[in-house]
Every structure is written in structure tokens, then in C-alpha cells.
Amino acid sequence: MKAILCTHFGGPDELEFKDLPDPSPGSGEVVVAVKSAALNFFDTLIIAGKYQLKPPFPFSPASEFAGVVERVGAGVTGLAAGDRVLGYGGFGAAREKVQIGAQRVVKIPDKLDFDRAAGVTVIYGTTLHALKDRAKLKSGETLAVLGASGGTGLAAIEIGKLMGAHVIACASSDDKLAFCRERGADEGINYAKEDIKEALRRVTKGKGADVIYDPVGGSYAEAALRSIAWQGRFLVIGFAAGEIPKIPLNLALLKGCDIVGVFWGAFIERDPQGHQANMAELVRWADAGQISAHVHATYPLAETPAAIKAIADRKVMGKVILHP
Ligand SMILES: NC(=O)c1ccc[n+]([C@@H]2O[C@H](COP(=O)([O-])OP(=O)(O)OC[C@H]3O[C@@H](n4cnc5c(N)ncnc54)[C@H](OP(=O)(O)O)[C@@H]3O)[C@@H](O)[C@H]2O)c1
């Protein structure tokens, strides 16, 4: 089989496109023929050695995928060759075949296409956990989403609307904001043109946002927190801007607000049943067209370096998909 391999930490152009022997399933495992693999922002970090997870070399990037079960190992029940599935392994999906524990794949309905299915797990899984389990977002509350046209941002717009929130998309260009409105955002703030603190106050008529979803960090985080509502919740999702902000704690005191950490990767290990329930909900929503898993672009597997560069260059709206 063909695979994209990271043999040492470096940039996207240092990835190698290689032949590997086909895998065999061990006990409790399946082998899936990958039809679509989805990239995330953290793939820009994992190949550079800048992510919290550092897999042993050589490894493939791309943590999530959709495809067809090809072989089933001893002891596996409920899955058979030919089943259409999506799956999440943390890394390792940028290859033609994935060998993975059967509990890490979920069957998908016939009409959910592989490209959309591949990109459901990370961005929507993170966001459902963030908005439902961590922020306890309530219908009628105001939700401000930073980096709103990116993967997790798009998921926050769509799940926020499904949960009944008034959604304010915040992004760096008018094109990105137009995309966010098409996906359901009620309002838009261009933080490249306007100070996000003043803009959030203006849009919420001085009250501030009840929940702030921040996958960007950098200088936006503190400015956004300064306009959170009384007893609001600020969700720490990620730091795509590169800088981890240092927040003055008096802001939490003055706003009576919560600064809430979200670590989806740890959640799925610590609460597998909660994760499975969330995934069942997400597959239902995707099947019903209630979440889009919008595909920005698809790339042949050999062009994985270009796909990763598009994410790092801040050009992507929604998901980037690889086709082995
Ligand atoms: N906490 C968790 O459990 C969890 C789970 C999944 C992902 N994450 C993290 O969440 C963050 C976002 O992931 P994602 O998949 O949504 O990424 P993405 O699709 O690349 O979107 C990130 C957004 O951040 C903004 N941005 C600002 N400065 C940027 C820069 N220098 N480079 C790239 N983007 C920049 C961009 O929007 P504008 O141009 O509009 O500013 C971009 O759309 C990452 O740090 C990721 O590791 C955390």
C-alpha cells in the first residue's frame, strides 16, 4: 500500500510518499481501506514535533478517516468486511489501509459520503463536548466563535445553531464571514478590521457574549474575554495563532465568568461512553444534513504536503480531505 510518512520532524515538504506492506488485523482490530482521510490544524504541528502527541517514527499524519472494512481480526463483533465506517486513531490515516482497534470505528449510513464522514469526528466531537458538556450552552444564549470559518469554528457555528444559540462568527476576512453566514451564523465580526472587544460589545448591545469559543488564541483571546457577559464561559479550544495567551485573572473575577479548558483527546479516553453517545448523535446529524462537514478541497494522497500548507497558510474554510 501507499503511505505518506513522517520519518523525522520537519515541514510538509519533508514528508515521504512510500510503499509499505499491507497490514493484517490483530485480535480486536480491523483493517479499513481508506477512501478519505481528513486533516486538521494539529497535523501542521504533529509533523513538526510541536504537538503534545509525538508518535514514534515513521508515522503518517491525518487522525481521522472514512472507508470500507476490509478484514476483521479475532474477537471482533458487530463489524464485517464491506461495512462503511468512519474512524479516529490520533494519527496514521494518510495511507491506503489503516489497522485499528474495532472500538475506534463507527458504522455510517449509506447516504453519508466518505469525504464528509472522514471530517466529522475531530471538529464536531470537540465542539459537541465543548458546548454541551463543558459550557452547558443554553438555547437563547449568545455564542461568539473565533476562527469561525476554520474546522472547529465551522462546527461551533453549526452545533451552536442546533442548540438554539444566537451565533456571532468572528474571522479575518469578509469572504470567510460570508461563508460563516451561509453555514448559519447570525452575525459576523471581521477582527482584521475591527477591535474584537468593541465589536462584541456593539453586537451584543453592551451585554457581552454568554459563551466564547476560542480555537485561535494569540492577541484575540484577552480582547474577547474583556467583552464576555456576566457569568459567561470562555472555552479554551486551541492556539492556531501560535501564541498561548496569558490572561490576567482579575478578568475572571470582574466578570464572574468561567475560563473552561477543553481537551477532547483526553475526554474520549476518560469517558468512552460519553464519547460514543456524542458520536452517535453526530452521525445522526450528519446523515440528516444538520451538520455539513463542509469540504474546502480534496487532494490526492501524494499531495499531502500541499494540503497541510493550505491549512498552515490560513486559507481553508471547513475541511481538507486526502484521497488515497
Ligand atoms: N481542545 C481540543 O480538544 C482541540 C481539538 C481539536 C482542535 N484543537 C485545536 O484548535 C485549533 C484550531 O483547529 P482547526 O482544525 O479549527 O484549525 P483551522 O481549520 O486551521 O482553523 C483555525 C483558524 O484559526 C485562525 N487563525 C488565526 N491565526 C492563524 C494562523 N497564524 N495560522 C492558522 N490559522 C490562524 C484562522 O481563521 P482567521 O483567518 O479567520 O483568523 C483559521 O481559520 C488548533 O490549535 C487545534 O490544535 C483543539
Image (cartoon, grey):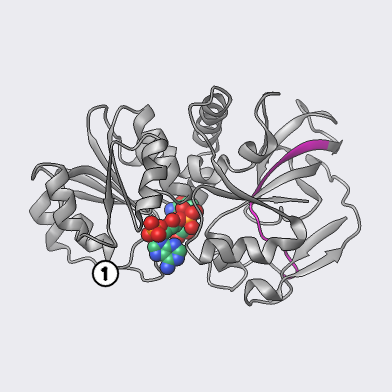
Please tell me in which quarter of the rendered image ligand 1 is found.
Answer: bottom left
Indicate the position of residue 205 as horizontal and vertical percent values: 9, 42
Magenta-span inclusion, residue 75: no
Q: Is residue 240 in view from this perspective?
A: no
Q: Residues within 10 Å of mark 1 (few under 14, many from 20)?
A: few
Q: Is residue 8 left or right of residue 170?
A: right
Residue bounds of the magenta highlight = 57-69
Mark 1 C-beta closer than 8 Å to ligand 1: no
Asked if 101 appears above or below 58 in the picture, the reply is above
Indicate the position of residue 161 as horizontal and vertical percent values: 35, 31
Indicate the position of residue 41 as horizontal and vertical percent values: 52, 59
Magenta-span inclusion, residue 66: yes
Between residue 177 and residue 229, name the one nearer to us: 177
State the residue position of label 1: 246
Residue at the far right: name it.
21
Q: In the image, what residue occupies the spot 71% across and 45% down?
A: 36
Asked if 8 appears above or below 161 in the picture, the reply is below
Query: In what quadrant of the picture does the N terminus appear?
Result: bottom right
